[in-house]
Image: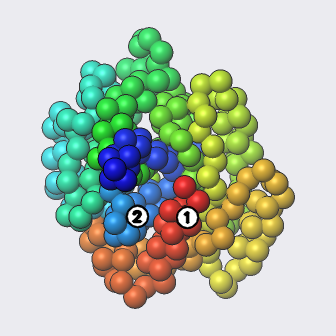
């Protein structure tokens, strides 16, 4: 009975957004996704960015370009309003699947423009998977924009994680993003799960400053755990692997694991 009930629960959908590029969205989405899967959760990752960074986190460039150039990717699914179940690719890791992106995602705004209910296209394409019982979590990596496509991502999500870089400009524009989300209240019930502070460098004092400012937004949760700057992250990305697979003992691997645990415990 317990198993049956579990299967009827829709997957929890979480997107990683911040209109600032380089804040750690793709890195967090890939590594938290991996850690959730390593903890035994069934996870689907959706690469919503034409930069293909989430796909490149698991497959080498040749394979990513092959998927991007085929018609089995998110762009064609959205353009043709297809059920996303047909677009799932298995990653090399247990419990972890991916829907790849395409360079053509740059045209998705244009494709959406003439569609009816254009903010809800992704939500509808995702409905079958969400309710299939196949996944516990669906994580969506968003591009660094705030257009109709990102509205689609927000409308398809239950929760939003906002990675923020601990740097002088890391918080710049964040209030805009919160206002943007607030403006979508009648379209989506997506809640901010938390702000994740990334790229923390102990030699600089931006971490304290960043956390203090973030905590002054009383209604917004800031994850207790955070991610330090770690060169292994870039090496792991170069090898198309999650950082924990590339080097299990590295600091950021333990940090991503802690964030995944925070997520599991709060949902
Ligand atoms: N904790 C970290 N330590 C070192 N480099 C990082 C870390 N997080 C991200 N990076 C690097 O910073 C760059 C931007 O990260 P990314 O996840 O692509 O950001 P976004 O998706 O928000 O644009 C990438 O080159 C990535 O390798
Ligand atoms: Mg990215």
Point out the residue furthest to the bottom here: 249
Tell me if residue 143 comes above or below residue 123 in the rendering: below
* Numbered mark located on residue 166 in the image: none
Label 2: which secondary element: helix
Mark 1 or mark 2: whose residue is earlier in sequence: 2
Q: CA distance from mark 1 to mark 2?
A: 12 Å
**Is 121 rendered above or below residue 45?**
above
Q: Tell me residue 50's x, y (percent).
A: 36, 42
Residue name at image x 52 percent, y 32 percent: 155
Residue in front for this viewpoint, 57 or 137: 137
Residue at position x 36%, y 61% in the image: 41
Residue 108 visible in the displayed image = no
Residue drawn at (51%, 69%) of the image? 261
Q: Secondary structure at mark 1?
A: helix
Whether 257 is drawn above or below 67: the answer is below
* x and y, in percent, of residue 263 in the image: 53, 61
Where does the image place residue 131, in percent across and percent down from the top left? 36, 37
Dot 1 and dot 2 residues touching (CB under 8 Å):
no
Q: Quadrant of residue 179?
A: top right
Report which residue position mark 1 lands on: 265
Q: Is residue 102 left or right of residue 172?
A: left
Q: Residue at x 67, y 42 (%)?
A: 177
Front disc: 1 or 2: 1
Relative to 234, say whether 220 is above or below: above
> Could you say where residue 21 lies in the image, as x and y percent from the top left?
54, 52
Residue that badge 2 annotates? 36
| Towards the viewer: 206 or 186 | 186
Could you tell me which quadrant the C terminus lies in? bottom right
Q: Is residue 128 among the parts visible in the rendering?
A: yes
């Amino acid at each position: 009975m317990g198993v049956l009930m579990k299967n009827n629960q829709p997957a929890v959908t979480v997107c990683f957004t911040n209109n600032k590029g380089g804040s750690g969205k793709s890195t967090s989405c890939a590594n938290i996704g991996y850690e959730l899967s390593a903890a035994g959760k069934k996870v689907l990752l959706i690469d919503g960015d034409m930069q293909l960074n989430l796909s490149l986190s698991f497959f080498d460039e040749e394979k990513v370009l092959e998927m991007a150039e085929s018609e089995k990717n998110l762009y064609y699914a959205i353009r043709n309003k297809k059920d996303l179940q047909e677009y799932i690719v298995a990653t090399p890791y247990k419990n972890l699947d991916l829907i790849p992106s395409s360079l053509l995602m740059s045209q998705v705004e244009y494709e959406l423009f003439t569609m009816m209910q254009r903010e809800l296209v992704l939500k509808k394409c995702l409905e079958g998977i969400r309710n299939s019982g196949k996944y516990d979590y669906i994580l969506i990596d968003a591009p660094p924009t705030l257009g109709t496509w990102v509205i689609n991502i927000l409308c398809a999500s239950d929760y939003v994680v906002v990675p923020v870089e601990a740097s002088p400009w890391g918080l710049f524009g964040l209030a805009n993003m919160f206002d943007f989300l607030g403006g979508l209240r009648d379209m989506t019930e997506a809640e901010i799960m938390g702000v994740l502070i990334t790229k923390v460098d102990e030699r600089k004092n931006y971490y304290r400053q960043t956390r203090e400012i973030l905590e002054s937004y009383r209604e917004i949760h800031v994850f207790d755990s955070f991610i330090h700057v770690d060169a292994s992250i870039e090496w792991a990305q170069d090898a198309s692997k999650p950082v924990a697979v590339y080097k299990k003992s590295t600091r950021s691997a333990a940090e991503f694991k802690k964030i995944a645990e925070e997520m599991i415990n709060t949902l």
